Image: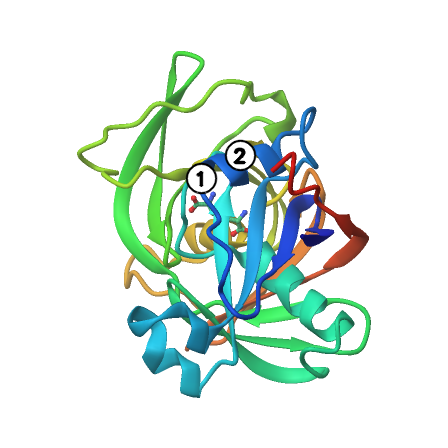
Amino acid sequence: MRFVKGHGTENDFVIVPDPGGSLDLTPAMVARLCDRRAGIGADGVLRVVRTKAMGDAHAAAADDAEWFMDYRNADGSVAEMCGNGVRVFARYLVDAGLAGPGEWNVATRAGLRRVSLGATGDVSVAMGAPVPLGAGQAAVDGRTYTGVRVSMGNPHLACPVDEPVATLDLTRAPSFDPEVFPEGVNVEFFRAVGDRHLEMRVYERGCGETRSCGTGTVATAAAAAIDPDTGTIPEGVWTVDVPGGRLTVTFDGVTSHLSGPAVLVAEGDIRSDWL
Ligand SMILES: N[C@@H](CCC[C@H](N)C(=O)O)C(=O)O
């Protein structure tokens, strides 16, 4: 089985081409691929499938998107969306000659996402309008943080902090009320470092701390930007620094755009007798 390894601001993925949808990718296989010592190592797996091969559940999307991003977290769990993943997915399709540079849709479990990219360089994606859902809380290291719950198709809690984010101990999972977050939650911690400029760290559902999270970056910028009087997100461009680099989020009053690097670093064969 072929694979490609890639990352977006060091949020890294094993890309598995499966155009015909014949691969039965089990949670155990995903966890083995993502194992950083015994496997290839990654925050998640991107299975590259033709949308029409995804079956009835995604048949409607096949008219609008040739390719479906089947995203899995490192622990084998399925997630609805991955913002860095969809950018790396698009870079892979262009690199492999399966799509041309330009603008086109990728189908995901959270719906269509429109990517925009050249033959090389950064990749942008229209992420949809963030959906603020009110306040929520998570606890880390005995301290409770209050933030904004935001849906980006997947669940987030974006918490403002006063201290530099580098000082937080994210070696253990934040705790949260499962009645508030029945599907689990990705928890972001952010601090303003300039005008529309944030630093952020994230503890991802199904992965642990990662060096970047695209959906989390947009959720964080939305939490910082939201007008408390109207609950709306004003137009504007935000810079978000994560441990793995820098991402740009643009709110245009209709949708949000996430832009940044998407890099392919290696490719090879996975031994079937191992997997
Ligand atoms: N790193 C991703 C998000 C991946 C999914 C997340 N862990 C979840 O379970 O919702 C991104 O770049 O958005």
Q: Is residue 177 above or below residue 72?
A: above
**Where's the C terminus, which quadrant?**
top right
Mark 1 crowdedness (10 Å alpha carbons): few <14, some 14-19, many ≥20: some
Q: Which residue is mark 2?
A: 31
> Label for residue 86?
none
Which element carries disc 1, helix, strand or loop?
Answer: helix
Color scheme of the displayed model: rainbow
Query: Which is more toward the observer, 237 or 152?
Result: 152
Give coordinates of residue 153: x percent, y percent. Answer: 36, 58
Residue 274 appearing in the image = yes
Give coordinates of residue 235: x percent, y percent. Answer: 49, 72
Q: Is mark 2 within 8 Å of ligand 1?
A: no
Query: Which is more toward the observer, 176 or 2?
Result: 2
Residue 230 in the figure: left or right of residue 75: left
> Label for residue 27?
1
Inter-mark Cα distance, 2 to 1: 6 Å
Q: Residue furthest front?
A: 273
